[in-house]
Image (spheres, grey):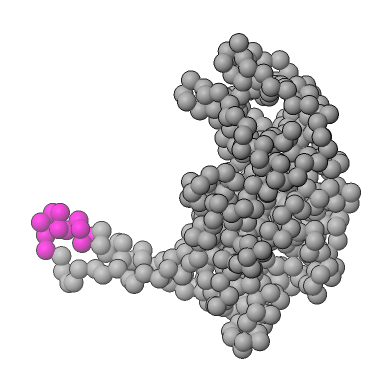
Amino acid sequence: MPRRRRLSAAAGTVASLVAFLAAAATFPLPASGPDGGPSLALRGGRIMTVTRGVLEDGILLILDGRIAAVGPSLAIPAGVEIIDIPDYVVTPGFIDAGTNLGAADPLASERDDDEATSPLTPQLNILDALNPADRLIPEARRFGTVYALCAPGRGNLLAGSSALVRLAGDDARAMALKAPAALHGSLGETPKLRYGPKNVYPSTRMGQAALLRQTLIETQEYLAARSAYAAKASAWAEKEARGDKPEGDRPVPPPHDARLASLVPVLEGERPLVLTANRLDDILTALRIADEFSLKLILNEGADAPKVKDRLAERGIPVLVRPRTAYRTTPETKDAAFEGAAALARAGIRIAFQTGSVLALGDLIPQAQRAIAHGLREEDALKALTLWPAEIFGVADVTGSIVKGKAADLVVFDRNPLRAPARVKLVIIGGRVVDRAD
């Protein structure tokens, strides 16, 4: 017979983080499926599928760590553990589309996400700074965040590569769903304020645009030199294979340049460039450079993005909207409006919410709630937490909605988190219950 566990909606109001984590540590893992993976059934909840509406009093069957079926009445195989979740709400695990989680600890005054020594550090990789044992990772799950785009700091013109990681595990590489996920850079006042006082180029917006262009041109030349070497080396090898004696010296590869090599996938369109730009002129500069070099651009923050929403929509450029706590805190963001997310979504632009930093760890849901209060449709707010960031970073085949075949990375809330303060009851990652609050 299937084993049953019931989660009561009448259980206590708000548990402390310590109690939450202690309960998670003692909660037994679900039964194993026929292939050895976890198997579990959630029964009786309100399932917010994202792409196929809301299923009331539904059943969600998990086999071998993946969603096997979703429906109003499903046959549950023998041996599969059942968790009854009456009146609860199930969503895909939320995606934080921009954070330094795992690479910064405010209590220790430690930051490994921001290399403030040069405006050009595209060769850096956030995975080399990500601590899987970071004490804040379980706390992020407490707010429904299951995935995070862990990214380098925003003070450099080109800062390095991010990684989209699943927030469970003991090895950064194994936790990464996509790494590198994107290359990150910044235009505007942040690099100016960092390097201007040091009299380091670039210290103006003109300099930023010029250096970014020059670096991309150098990458084109580096790529051309590598391609020319590959062609010569191939021709040389073919002659040797035929027994002919090639003329001249054996081709020598160009010196490796880690800085330029990291930009090759960006130039070839295989990896997006996430550019932080808030003021209108910086956004327009980002668009011009993206057009000049045929870059796959993602706009980050974009306080003035609604002013050019039609251009962004025409180019299919998504926006990682600025954290709620950072609106109108700098000269660049003085015109930012909480209605911006709704304006972008109405224009057909995919948006994604981000905390921006571990200093705003629990701010993901409040951002969505604030955006809803200022005109964003609830269904679009849910997409901005789940499906849209998954699509933006190319992992929508794995996560972002509750459909058959996707990873069972789910959160169970005691109520709809987009409408009222909600408490996380279960966090399920890869079909395993990793956190539970009674």
Which quadrant of the structure image shows residue 335? bottom right
Horizontal relation, residue 124 to residue 352: left or right = left
Question: In the figure, 423 relative to 250: above or below?
Answer: above
Question: In the figure, 409 relative to 133: above or below?
Answer: above
Front position in the image: 232 or 150? 150
Q: Tell me if I can see residue 3 in this picture.
A: yes
Q: Tell me if I can see residue 297 in this picture.
A: no
Front position in the image: 230 or 350? 350
70 in magenta: no
Question: In the figure, 91 relative to 375: above or below?
Answer: above
Q: Residue at x 62, y 87 (%)?
A: 198
Q: Residue furthest top?
A: 1
Q: Residue at x 51, y 57 (%)?
A: 127
Specify start and end residues of the magenta stretch as a single range: 235-245
Which quadrant of the structure image shows residue 157? bottom right
Q: Quadrant of the C terminus?
A: top right
Front position in the image: 136 or 255? 136
Main SS, magenta residues = helix
Horizontal relation, residue 264 to residue 304: left or right = left
Q: Residue at x 25, y 62 (%)?
A: 233
Q: Quadrant of the N terminus?
A: top right
Point out residue 86 in the picture as x, y percentages from the top left corner.
Answer: 78, 24
| Number of numbered markers | 0
Point out residue 361 in the picture as x, y percentages from the top left corner.
Answer: 71, 54
Point out residue 205 in the picture as x, y percentages from the top left corner.
Answer: 67, 79
239 in magenta: yes
